[in-house]
Image (cartoon, helix red, strand yellow):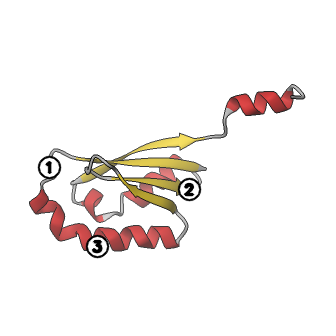
């Protein structure tokens, strides 16, 4: 299952409390990428977080993986998770013979 994970900084986040954790956060993210959990990652152009394309068995499994990230454990960031599926109109076209 593909899941779009959009980070959201909490009201507790400041430059001073984020900066000390960035190196570990990058290592944690790369570890999930090498495990093929995070397929791709992007920086939000607004400058306030990241977006991950994830591959997990469920939304709950994705949440469990993200809960181990340093900024989430510290209460500095959280993620909004959006499960993705194939476009339904494509499936209808195929079932109607096209």
Q: Secondary structure at mark 3?
A: helix
Residue at mark 2 to residue at mark 1: CA–CA distance:
29 Å
Residue at mark 2 to residue at mark 3: CA–CA distance:
22 Å
Q: Secondary structure at mark 2?
A: loop
Query: In the rendered structure, which disc, 2 or 1, sits on the residue that comes first in sequence?
Result: 1
Image coordinates for residue 89, horizontal then vertical, percent: 71, 28
Residue 62 numbered tag: none
Q: Residue at x 16, y 52 (%)?
A: 13
- Few, some or many C-alpha atoms within 10 Å of disc 2 (few <14, some 14-19, many ≥20)? some
Image coordinates for residue 70, horizontal then vertical, percent: 28, 65
Residue 55, picture quadrant: bottom right
Q: Residue at x 30, y 52 (%)?
A: 49
Q: Secondary structure at mark 1?
A: loop
Q: Is residue 80 left or right of residue 97?
A: left
Q: Residue at x 36, y 63 (%)?
A: 68
Residue 12 numbered tag: 1
Residue 56 numbered tag: 2
Q: Nearer the viewer, residue 16 or 75?
A: 16
Reading the image, the residue beneath label 3 is 24
Q: Residue at x 42, y 71 (%)?
A: 30
Q: Nearer the viewer, mark 2 or mark 3?
A: 3
Residue sitting farthest toward the right: 97
Query: In the rendered structure, which disc, 2 or 3, sits on the residue that comes first in sequence?
Result: 3
Say if 47 sits above or below 71 in the image: above
Q: Is residue 96 left or right of residue 77?
A: right
Say if 50 sits above or below 86 in the image: below
Q: Is residue 95 left or right of residue 79?
A: right
Residue at mark 3 to residue at mark 1: CA–CA distance:
19 Å
- Few, some or many C-alpha atoms within 10 Å of disc 3 (few <14, some 14-19, many ≥20)? few
Question: Tags 2 and 1 in contact by the CB under 8 Å rule?
Answer: no
- Few, some or many C-alpha atoms within 10 Å of disc 1 (few <14, some 14-19, many ≥20)? few
């Amino acid at each position: 299952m593909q899941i779009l994970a959009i980070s959201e900084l909490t009201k507790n986040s400041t430059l001073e409390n984020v900066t000390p954790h960035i190196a570990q956060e990058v290592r944690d993210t790369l570890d999930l990428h090498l495990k093929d959990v995070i397929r791709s990652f992007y920086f939000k152009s607004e400058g306030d977080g990241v977006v991950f394309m994830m591959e997990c068995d469920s939304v709950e499994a994705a949440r469990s993986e993200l809960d181990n990230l340093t900024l989430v454990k510290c209460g500095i960031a959280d993620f909004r998770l959006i499960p993705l599926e194939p476009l339904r109109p494509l499936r209808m076209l195929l079932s109607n013979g096209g």
